[in-house]
Each structure stands twice: as structure tokens, then as C-alpha cells.
Amino acid sequence: MPDSQPRLIALDWGTSSLRAYLLGADACVLEQRHLPRGLMQLPNAGDGAPGAASFEAAFADACGDWLRDTPQVPVIAAGMVGSAQGWCEAPYVDVPASVDRPGGALTVVRTASGQAVHIVPGLRQRGMLPNVMRGEETQVIGALHACATTLEPRPERWLIGLPGTHSKWVSVHRQTVERFHTFMTGEVYAALRQHTILGRTMQHDAQNDDAAFVRGVRITRGESAAAGMLSTIFSCRTLGLTGALSPRAQADYLSGLLIGHELAGLEAAEPTFARDAGPAARIVLVGDSALCRRYRVALSEYGHACVDFIEHATPIGLWKLACVAGLVHAETRSDAAAVDARPHAIDAKP
Amino acid sequence: MPDSQPRLIALDWGTSSLRAYLLGADACVLEQRHLPRGLMQLPNAGDGAPGAASFEAAFADACGDWLRDTPQVPVIAAGMVGSAQGWCEAPYVDVPASVDRPGGALTVVRTASGQAVHIVPGLRQRGMLPNVMRGEETQVIGALHACATTLEPRPERWLIGLPGTHSKWVSVHRQTVERFHTFMTGEVYAALRQHTILGRTMQHDAQNDDAAFVRGVRITRGESAAAGMLSTIFSCRTLGLTGALSPRAQADYLSGLLIGHELAGLEAAEPTFARDAGPAARIVLVGDSALCRRYRVALSEYGHACVDFIEHATPIGLWKLACVAGLVHAETRSDAAAVDARPHAIDAKP
């Protein structure tokens, strides 16, 4: 029988929501909560960012009762809570960075009552076009750990895809995050649908139109994609005008175009993703299963049929980071198994 | 002294506005009006498009008095007024199409009082990604005519750029529109500024920041553009976060990125634009002078320093089309000079 003693409070605190996990031994999830208390939902302190009191109040709502019951349990948090607009800024760690110890130290913020909250730093990539992440580094750590416990032999190179508002693709060699890429795919899709002429002729359909999605992806691999995304997206309208794309298919077609352009960009910029160029990486998708399924279909069009999938990587990532920081002690049996973060097969068929 | 007898009423009737020109001999502009009576401003007939009564009322406001004074003067119109949502659909003409006689016939719609309005057809390009224009074909005709009267020897190949909400680039060989490209640059720029995270940190500055604009354009010519637009635009945010791009410079930087991606796409897709590939075309920009100036700067970064500019090409285009259709008679002296549509030099220096 598993030990049900709470060992760690793990917070995934982003822009739009706050997820709280009460973890027992072996990262076993004893209880979890989802609160609409992301940074954007917290009252503004007047300078454009929420004040400490707002964070304390949300924190108390998320896990005040857990801390009253077991006051000694340590607390760790990842995400935008550690940004300049967050509760306490946890300075970025530059890549290349070890996934086991991203920057070493966690940043500690204390509540008025003295409770320590350990904040995970984000990652930064310097260069002409710098790149940043906060929260995704924890998902990467969780995903690698979950996969490592099930895949034999352990791959040396990983490419972790985190689709979403701002999709990230993280290239890992052994235990080191070497570089990463960001694509604003989800946010651009929403802006195009809601605020351009392309959305006007779209009709909502509860059923996904996979054929239209694949049609969009394939455009991005063909000759007519040479003119780039600003040009290809206009075809949602012209195919509609000429009767070649029904209003119900237009949203999925646009989604296919954008995700396809993302993968075409990744192919051009990331050597471990390009076919027949450099060492291939094991691809793992992390996140919402419906969205990951779309990416799985698009990846298949780009010649990558073998893809793993992890839905909830953050709690296991926070557990691993708490172990490295000495806040909790790793157990002998598989952490990954305990939170059921093992990689799943997802059906890539449209 | 020029003849001030009205010869033609020429309407440039688009989605957002209606411009009316009273033209005398030689396309001389006797009077002009700008009304906020584009298709989007007209009352809806219930099926998503304005009804004939709405078009008649706007038409009467625009030129009813001109027609009362000289009832025999013919009327010609170009733009979305000829679309399926317009007053009367003028079927598209497929490219390649002669610029002098795009499809030959104009479509005639009559008001309740029997006044004929001759509507210019738009152009369509068939293919896997079809393309359409309405109104721009008239600007192209006007621009070619204006340039032809001043440039000696007359170039054989032209590339006419019409920057805007949906930028068009039209490739003309002798008197034939061979093909064209559309880029949703202006509309995507507005959607990104107003409806994504990129706009949140931007501060408005009345002064253009040309250095930031050029910086954005140059990114699109460099190695870091390989990942594509969905990736490069995120640098507006990360350069801001790292203090390398001030809030006041971010809008111009984003504009440079998008216009640069448009030109990179054009370079990949249009043989007469690509450097060192195929026959070079004479480049002419048509439209708003401030926007054309930005494009002029970006074109210079792409190795095209020699660019002509025409601000008002539509009235001369409508005059030419009316001549071809026999509605008016061409005069001996230069039409172009009469409407001051001669190409101007625009300063490309940032």
C-alpha cells in the first residue's frame, strides 16, 4: 500500500491558471486543484503587475488548507510566477543548461507568515533573436524523466515539442538542454480567426475536419509554400470564394497551414529534426492530448511517424527538481509510474 | 486653357470607402469626393450583403448632382462593388489577361432611373492556391499608363507592388498581366499589434523609428529567419524582455519583420524579383506615400534600389478602361500628366 503522507506541494502557476498538486512519496498525486488564478486574473497592483498580496491570497486559496494540515511540507512552483511580473523574479538560466539542475538554486519567496515558496528559474537563449521559457523547462524535465524510465536503450538526443499558444521545441542532448525554438502558432491562429477577414467565412463545426487539416499541412511542404505564410493563408479565402473549401473546413485548413509552417520552420532551423541531416532525435510531444494529436498527424506528414506523448509532465518535473534541491528525497520505485506520466501512444490517423 | 467639360464619372468603390472622380478631357480631375460608403459601411440587406437600394443611395450621394448637371456623362466603377457581395457581380477574368482589355466587356448595372454603371471585372489566378483581386487591376492599368508616358525606353517587364491590408504584387510582361501574389501583411500586422501579446509592450510613437524598421527587415534576410515568421515575430517580445528593443521601437521593428517576410516570399516565388535569376522587372509601387516609402526602404535592403512610385493610379486606370470600352475618347495629350499620376521619386533613406 502506498504511503499517503504528503511530501511536496507543487504549483504550476502560469499566465492564465494556477494548478496545485499535493504529492506523496514517489511523486504520487494525492490531490490536485485547478484555479483560475493565473497572473492575468490577479488584481493589478497599479504598475501593470499583481502585488505580493494578490499572490499570497491566491496561494492561500490553492494550498492554505494543505499547509495547515502538514505545515512542514515544502512548496515548489514553476511558470510565470517567477517572471518580472510574477511574485518574485527567478532569474533566467542560460542554455546550454543541465536538465537535472537548471541553474542550481531555486529562488525563495516567503509569505507574510514565513512559508517558503521555491521558484524554478526559466531558461534563456542569448543571440540575435533571444528566446525565453518559463514553466516549459519543468515540463521538459518531467517528460525526459518519464520517458527515461520506460525507453530502453535510453536515447541520447531528444526533441521535446510543447504545442500551444507559444509552441516550444526543446533540443536535449543527454542531460543538457542545448537550444530551443518558439513559434507563436496558437496565438496567431486565434488572432487570424477572430480578427481578420479569414474568420468571417468560417463556420464552426464541432467535428474536426482532418482531411482539411492535412490539406493545409501538405501545402506547407509543397512548392506553393515558397511565398511564405503571409501568402499561403490568403488561400483560406480564395479557396472559399472559388468553392473549393467549404466554410466548415476553413478553420481546420488554416490550423494545418500554421502548424505546417511551424514544422517547416523547425525543419529549417533544428538539425535534429531535419530529415537526412545530422543526428536524429527522439520526438516527444507534451501537453493537451487533442492538440498533440493534431501535431502527431502533422509530424507524420513531415516524415516523423515515431512520436511519444506525455500529457501531464509538470508534477513529475517539479518532483524531480525538488529532489535535486534536497526538498524531498527520491524513492527507489519509479517516480514516473506513480503519477502515471508514462508515454502513451496516440493515434496519428486523421 | 483645358476643356472643363465633364467626360466621365469614375468610382473607386471598395470595402471601406467610396472615392468619386469627375473627369474632364484627358482624364483631368475636375472634382473628387471621398465618402465613408464602402461595402462594409452600407446597410445590410439581411443576407450578409448590402442590397441594391443601399448602393443606389450611396451612388446618389457620391455623384447624383454631377449626373443632374450633365446627364449624358458615362459612369465606370472598380473594386469590391463588382464582387458577389457588391452591387452587381462582374465575373473575374482569368490571368494571363491583357491590361488594355481585361476580359473585354464591363458589366453594366442600372439604377432605378436607368443610369448605367459600368463595372470593371477583377482578375483571378487559378491553381492549387487560387488568387483574386478587385480594384487593383485598375490601379495596375493606371500605373502602367502613367509610367509608359514618362519612361523611355519602355520596359518590357513590370512588377507592380500595391502595399496595404492585402498587398498585391503583379507581374506584367508587355501588356499582359502574367501572374500575381497576395500577402496579408497589413491585416496580419494589425491583428498582431491589437490582439496578441506583442502589442502589450508596444508604446505608440508619432515618429517612425526607421532604424528599428530596417533592423526587422534585415532579420528576414539573415540566417535566423529560417524558422519562419511564426518564430521571428516572438523576438519583438524577447528583445523587449532583454532590454534590446525599446517599447517605442517595437511596432516599427514588427512592421519591418512582416514587410521583410513579404519580400523574402516574393523573392522565392516571383522570378522577375529574385536577384540573379531570370529577367529583371521594373518595380513600381502604387498607393499611400508613407506606406510606399517603407516598402521602398525594405526593397532597398533586398537589393532593389530603383523603384518608381505612383500615388493615385485609379482615376487614370478607370479613364483608360473607359477609353477601351468606347465610353470616352482618348485625347492626344498625355492623360498621365493631366491627373498628375507621373511617377515620383521617393526618398528611401531611413
Image (cartoon, coloured by chain):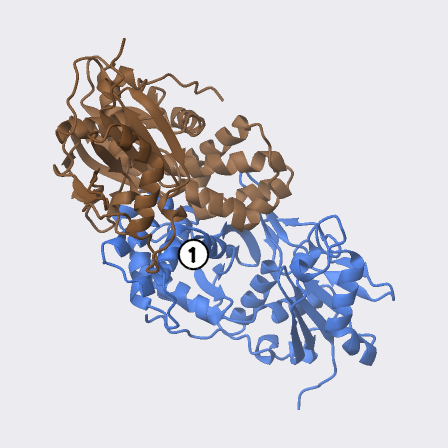
Chain colours: A blue, B brown
The picture quadrant where one finds residue B226 is: top left
> In the picture shown, does residue B310 fall above or below A78?
above
> Residue drawn at (46%, 42%), measured in percent from left and top?
B189
- Which residue, given by chain and number where applicable, does mark 1 sit on? A193
Q: Residue B33 at x, y = what percent?
A: 38, 30
Q: In the rendered view of the protein, which quadrant contains the C terminus of chain A?
A: bottom left
> In the picture shown, does residue A35 fall above or below B59?
below
The picture quadrant where one finds residue A104 is: bottom right
Q: Residue A263 at x, y = what percent?
A: 39, 54
Image mark 1: chain: A
Q: Which of A105 and A254 is in front in this view?
A: A254
The amino acid type, in three-letter code, at marker 1 is: Arg
Q: Residue A71 at x, y = what percent?
A: 83, 75
Q: How crowded is mark 1: few (under 14 residues within 10 Å), some or many (20 or more)?
A: many
Residue sitting at the far top: B1
> Residue drawn at (66%, 91%), measured in percent from left and top?
A1
Q: Residue B279 at x, y = what percent?
A: 21, 26
Whether residue A101 is visible to the viewer of this picture, yes or no, is no
Helix, strand or loop under label 1: helix
Left or right: residue A211 versus residue A45 is: left
Left or right: residue A245 versus residue B35 is: left
Q: Nearer the viewer, residue B192 or B311?
A: B311
Left or right: residue A27 versus residue A302 is: right
The picture quadrant where one finds residue B335 is: top left
